[in-house]
């Protein structure tokens, strides 16, 4: 009897020591392994000094742009009725100017030497809107900040299937019937750019650029763009267009913005553009600590 009690006593001590060791191990793991999925930043919050400037410019298309191709919508007659002149949108060039180019500050520093990627910026409270109208996405290219709401609407009298295909954010795929409530989503991680498609209408494509800061713009039909509220400093400004390679084409240039001034950044794409283009430039590489990759 005494021997049996001694055995139980020893086992109790061993089990207690094992439990204590496990607890200590878990505590050490939690302290040493931060949540890698967190979007929180240790940088300082940017506060306006009232001396911000702009980056302005225009995007040209050199050479003869490819003619838009008429899209066969026979698979869904509603699309043909809603938009009988539906054409491809991958190269929207008119009079030597190129639309739908995503222009953004890729890296650089303010005049006090602080890297722009080390700042944190308030998330906009207004949602960015992506509509499905005439069986195509409007706008074709757009930008948002990380965690900013994206409100997706369906203005068509037919059903769509919204399917973003990111690489560093979670992928999702959601059907949206005509007349259905808007879909609201957000992307927690910066990513340039996220392709969006419709599984029911394969010609439908859109691109969403997600950044941790608000310094981006999309060129209009006249090729012009303006990035507002830029702190004085020197930056690398990048321009991305979906054509030119499996991951699009990106070009960069250095721009200095003086206090209350404007930096100039003009870009050119097309067959006759300079050799500074970098087909497939959006590989998995950091920019402002942002993962950057595009997949069609």
Image (cartoon, rainbow, N blue to C red):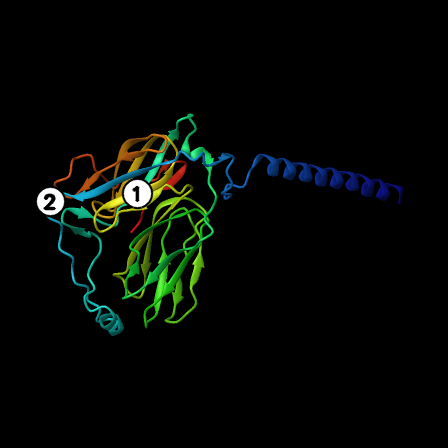
Q: Is residue 174 above or below residue 5?
A: below
Using the image as rendered, state which of residue 60 and residue 251 is in the foreground: 60
Whether residues under marks 2 and 1 lie with C-beta atoms below 8 angstroms apart, the answer is no
Q: What's the residue at 39%, 71% (across, down)?
A: 179
Note whether 37 is above or below 88 in the view shown. Answer: above
Q: Quick one: label 2 or label 1, which is nearer the N terminus?
A: 2
Q: Nearer the viewer, mark 2 or mark 1?
A: 1
Q: Residue at x 81, y 43 (%)?
A: 8
Which residue is pictured at 42% across the width and 25% down the height?
112
Who is closer to the viewer here, 12 or 104?
Answer: 104
Task: Tell me the number on the disc at residue 226.
Answer: 1
Quarter assignment of residue 136: bottom left
Report crowding for label 1: few under 14, some 14 to 19, many 20 or more residues within 10 A (C-alpha).
many
Q: Position of residue 116 (x, y in %)?
A: 41, 33
The residue lying furthest to the top in this view is 112
The residue beneath circle 2 is: 63
Task: Decide if residue 293 is in sight here.
Answer: no
């Amino acid at each position: 009897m005494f021997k049996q009690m001694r055995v139980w006593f020893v086992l109790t001590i061993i089990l207690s020591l094992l439990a204590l060791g496990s607890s200590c191990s878990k505590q050490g793991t939690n302290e040493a392994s931060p949540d890698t999925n967190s979007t929180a930043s240790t940088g300082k919050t940017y506060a306006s000094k009232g001396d911000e400037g702009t980056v302005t410019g225009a995007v040209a298309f050199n050479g003869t742009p490819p003619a838009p191709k008429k899209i066969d919508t026979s698979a869904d007659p509603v699309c043909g009725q809603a938009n009988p002149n539906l054409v491809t949108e991958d190269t929207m060039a008119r009079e030597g100017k190129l639309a739908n180019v995503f222009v953004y500050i890729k890296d650089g520093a303010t005049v006090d030497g602080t890297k722009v990627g080390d700042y944190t910026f308030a998330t906009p409270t207004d949602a960015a809107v992506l509509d499905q109208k005439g069986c195509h996405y409007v706008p074709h290219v757009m930008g948002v900040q990380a965690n900013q709401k994206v409100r997706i609407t369906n203005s068509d009298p037919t059903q769509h299937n919204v399917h973003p295909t990111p690489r560093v954010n979670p992928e999702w795929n959601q059907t949206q019937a005509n007349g259905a409530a808007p879909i609201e989503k957000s992307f927690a991680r910066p990513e340039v750019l996220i392709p969006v498609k419709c599984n029911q209408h394969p010609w439908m494509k859109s691109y969403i650029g997600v950044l941790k800061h608000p310094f981006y713009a999309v060129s209009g039909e006249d090729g012009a763009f303006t990035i507002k509220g830029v702190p004085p400093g020197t930056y690398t400004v990048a321009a991305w267009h979906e054509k030119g390679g499996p991951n699009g084409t990106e070009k960069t240039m250095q721009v200095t913005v003086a206090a209350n001034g404007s930096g100039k950044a003009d870009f050119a794409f097309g067959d006759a553009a300079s050799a500074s283009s970098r087909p497939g430039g959006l590989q998995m590489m950091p920019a402002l600590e942002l993962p950057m990759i595009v997949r069609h």
